[in-house]
Amino acid sequence: MELYSELEDPSFTLAPYQSIWKSHITRVVESVLDTAHVPIVHCKTIGKNSSLKVQFQFQAEGDTIWIKNEKVQLEYRFPQHWILRTRQERKNRLFNYVTFTPIDDKHTAIMGYVGRIFLKLSMVNKLFSKYSCKILKED
Ligand SMILES: [Fe+2]
């Protein structure tokens, strides 16, 4: 299986995070693909500047779904991982790579990395990790 190219690009600094949701993996995947919830559920974090008039382009082919607008591009590969890329110039680029792993029929582990080209100090990793966990708690 081919990985997303960003995961093998040494110019990105990675901040890991993880959480366990009390939910079946199908519900977790359904939730993370639901772009409409971002400006509502995440109105204090990643959805702060999002419009309620959600407009995304969707495309599916084989085991991959692409969801994108002018700001972000999400590439979901079945059965259980995705990457969300910001569509900014390279020096400000950020990605969020996430895997979804079923523990049992009522629990799913979410493990991810926030990758960035800017602010490469290792102590900043904790801030990105903490912020990612905060976002997951909003769901
Ligand atoms: Fe969410």
Image (cartoon, rainbow, N blue to C red):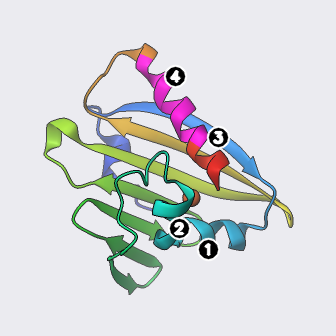
Identify the residue shown where x is 70% and y is 57%: 101
In terms of sequence position, does the residue under pointer 2 or pointer 3 come before the other? 3
Q: Position of residue 2 (x, y in %)?
A: 40, 60
In terms of sequence position, does the residue under pointer 4 or pointer 2 come before the other? 2
Which quadrant of the figure has residue 11?
A: top left
Which quadrant of the figure has residue 22?
A: bottom right
Amino acid type at circle 1 is: Glu
Q: How far apart are the two marked residues, 1 and 2, measured between alpha carbons?
A: 11 Å
Where is mark 2, residue-wise? 37
In terms of sequence position, does the residue under pointer 3 or pointer 1 come before the other? 3
Q: Is label 2's Cβ within 8 Å of ligand 1?
A: yes
Amino acid type at circle 2 is: His
- Tell me the number on the disc at residue 126: 4
Q: Are marks 1 and 2 in contact (CB under 8 Å)?
A: no
Amino acid type at circle 3 is: Gln
Under tag 4, what secondary structure? helix
Seen in the picture, residue 107 relative to 93 is either above or below; the reply is: below
Where is mark 1, residue-wise? 30
Range shown magenta: 124-134
Query: In the depicted view, which residue is nearer to us: 100 or 69?
Result: 69
